[in-house]
């Protein structure tokens, strides 16, 4: 089989999560796949190559910029793969049913009601179909959150601490994922978790870390009303990374099968 579209080797975040997804996913030629939160096409391109022209992959992302970027990478290749704009939580009722539903780094965005969003999604599985989703689960970067909490307490930042606490507790856990898949009547439910170390240097390297800045550090800044205070606080945190490194994410994959 051609492997032109294997997962990118130099991606330290999406690729390890997608490897967990592929570990659980059973896929064959001719399968029809829905890939949600498709972003730049990990793993949609790879899945399209696996299912071949007898199958199809519909890759859905809520941000048009992501869809346009993926379409431009695709060009005229893999014509049975389509990138479309759509919200994975509110897919249209008349959408076709799929043999497989995948979503790499997706489940954390099933807000505000993760169970309901999951219930809506699995409606689009054919009987005997499989869903596999990945996300950073509870425990991800806990050494950082614990340190930030301690520093907030030392400075008597009570409002900011409360906001941080809310953010931390809102994260999805592997046990929620397992419980919900079972409650939805899925079979052969499996949920796995593996640590993933995210290396970082101190100072600007930490504050502008391409992975941490976008998804995680911004959440700390959002705990502050006063952004100057937030910057001052974060500069101190960044200068002392020995207090919370090594930094580990928890790579969680959840999967289940719709009864045949
Ligand atoms: C962390 S990226 C993962 C992208 C890709 N699957 C990967 O592994 O690189 C998450 C993606 O989910 C998309 N997203 C967030 N909320 C969404 C929603 N409600 N419906 C569809 N896509 C969503 C974002 O636009 C972003 O592209």
Image (spheres, rainbow, N blue to C red):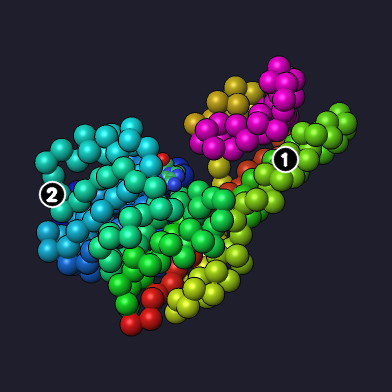
Left or right side of 98 for 11: right
Residue nearest the viewer, comparing 212 with 226: 226
Where's ligand 1: which quadrant? top left
Where is the N terminus found, in terms of image quarters? bottom left
Callout 1 touching callout 2 (CB < 8 Å): no
Q: Quadrant of residue 154?
A: top right
- Rendered position, 104 above or below 192: above
Q: Is residue 52 above or below residue 125?
A: above
The Cα–Cα distance between marks 1 and 2, rounded to whole angstroms, is: 45 Å
Tell me which corner region of the image, top left, top right, bottom left or bottom right, holds residue 247: top right
Magenta part, dominant SS: helix
Q: Is residue 70 left or right of residue 21?
A: left
In the rendered image, residue 105, in percent from the top left (x then y), is placed at 46, 50
Residue at figure coordinates x 43%, y 72% from the top left: 256
Identify the disc placed on residue 72.
none
Mark 2 sits near ligand 1, with its Cβ under 8 Å away: no
Q: Which residue is mark 2?
A: 79
Name, please, the residue furthest toward the front: 93
> Which residues are the magenta region?
211-240
Q: Is residue 224 magenta?
A: yes
Q: Residues within 10 Å of mark 2 (few under 14, many from 20)?
A: few
Q: Secondary structure at mark 1?
A: helix
Specify which label sits upstream in the sequence, 1 or 2: 2
């Amino acid at each position: 089989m051609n492997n032109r579209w294997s997962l990118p080797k130099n991606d330290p975040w999406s690729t390890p999560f997608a490897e967990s997804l592929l570990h659980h996913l059973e896929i064959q030629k001719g399968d029809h796949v829905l890939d949600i939160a498709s972003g730049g096409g990990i793993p949609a391109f790879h899945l399209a190559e696996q299912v071949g022209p007898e199958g199809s992959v519909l890759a859905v992302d809520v941000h048009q910029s992501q869809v346009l970027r993926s379409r431009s990478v695709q060009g005229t290749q893999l014509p049975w793969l389509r990138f479309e704009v759509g919200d994975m939580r509110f897919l249209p009722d008349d959408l076709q049913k799929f043999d497989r539903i995948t979503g790499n780094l997706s489940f954390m965005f099933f807000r505000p009601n993760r169970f309901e969003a999951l219930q809506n999604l699995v409606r689009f599985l054919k009987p005997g179909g499989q869903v596999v989703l990945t996300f950073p689960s509870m425990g991800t970067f806990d050494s950082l959150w614990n340190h930030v909490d301690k520093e907030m307490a030392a400075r008597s930042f009570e409002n900011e601490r409360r906001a941080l606490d809310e953010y931390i507790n809102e994260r999805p856990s592997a046990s929620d994922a397992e419980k919900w898949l079972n409650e939805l009547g899925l079979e052969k439910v499996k949920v796995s978790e593996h640590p993933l170390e995210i290396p970082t240097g101190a100072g600007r390297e930490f504050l502008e870390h391409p992975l941490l800045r976008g998804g995680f550090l911004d959440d700390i800044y959002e705990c502050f009303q006063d952004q100057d205070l937030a910057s001052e606080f974060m500069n101190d945190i960044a200068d002392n990374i020995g207090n919370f490194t090594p930094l580990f994410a928890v790579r969680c994959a959840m999967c289940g099968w719709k009864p045949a």
